[in-house]
Amino acid sequence: MKNLLSGKKEGFTLLEVIITLIIASIMGSMLITMTGGAVTRSTQPVIQTAEINTMNSVADSVARAYRELGSTSDLQTEIGNGTFNAAGITVTANLTGYGTGSSPSEGASNEFLKVTVTGSTGLSYDLIFGDIEI
């Protein structure tokens, strides 16, 4: 556009517009690169907290079932049937002895049931159940 009084052109040239767009796109890509990982990682604590809550409720269910069933062998059978597995949560049970160094009370065995509750993000914890009377 030409200014009628001075004879000078007003506005931006095509080269100025192209350079401005290139600089803006470079800065935008840098911003996305720097913040993209932070936004993705910001959801991990929320996911882990939800998973811990689910794992706690599963562990409570296992403990409640042990009190109702009354023996580690019955609890191991229930866990083997997949009764306590939830979305993303796996429950496994291993019957293990505690050795010959100490003897259980009369009528009890020298074995305990180690129950492992594992979440999909790798979090896990163990519960120990035994038929030992004190």
Image (cartoon, helix red, strand yellow):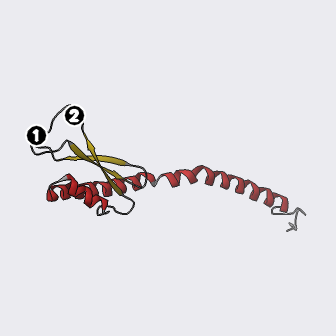
Q: Residue at x 87, y 67 (%)?
A: 2
Query: Considering the image in quadrants, where does the N terminus appear?
Result: bottom right
Q: Report if residue 131 is visible in the image.
A: yes
- In the rendered image, the residue lying farthest to the right is 7
Question: Please, is residue 60 above or below residue 102 in the view?
Answer: below
Coordinates of residue 117 in the picture (x, y in percent): 33, 52
Callout 1 amino acid: Ser
Task: Measure the alpha-carbon separation of dots 1 and 2.
Answer: 13 Å
Where does the C terminus fall, quadrant-wise?
A: top left
Residue at 10%, 45% in the rendered image? 107
Looking at the image, the residue that sits furthest to the top is 101
Q: Residue at x 28, y 54 (%)?
A: 56
**Quarter residue 51 falls in:** bottom left
The picture places residue 92, in percent across and down from the top left corner, at 33, 54
Q: Label 2 is placed on what type of residue?
A: Thr
Q: Find residue 100 and name its label.
A: 2
Q: Quadrant of residue 68?
A: bottom left
The residue at which mark 1 appears reads as 105
Q: Helix or strand or loop: what does disc 1 sit on?
A: loop
Residue nearest the observer in this picture, 121 or 91: 91
* Residue 13 in sight in this render: no
**Which is more N-terminal, label 2 or label 1?**
2
Element under label 2? loop
Query: Which class describes the residues within 10 Å of circle 1: few (<14), some (14-19), or many (20+)?
Result: few
Quadrant in the picture for residue 24: bottom right
In the foreground, 14 or 72: 72
User: How far from the left and from the top, in percent, is residue 47?
Assistant: 41, 56
Q: Nearer the viewer, residue 35 or 117?
A: 117
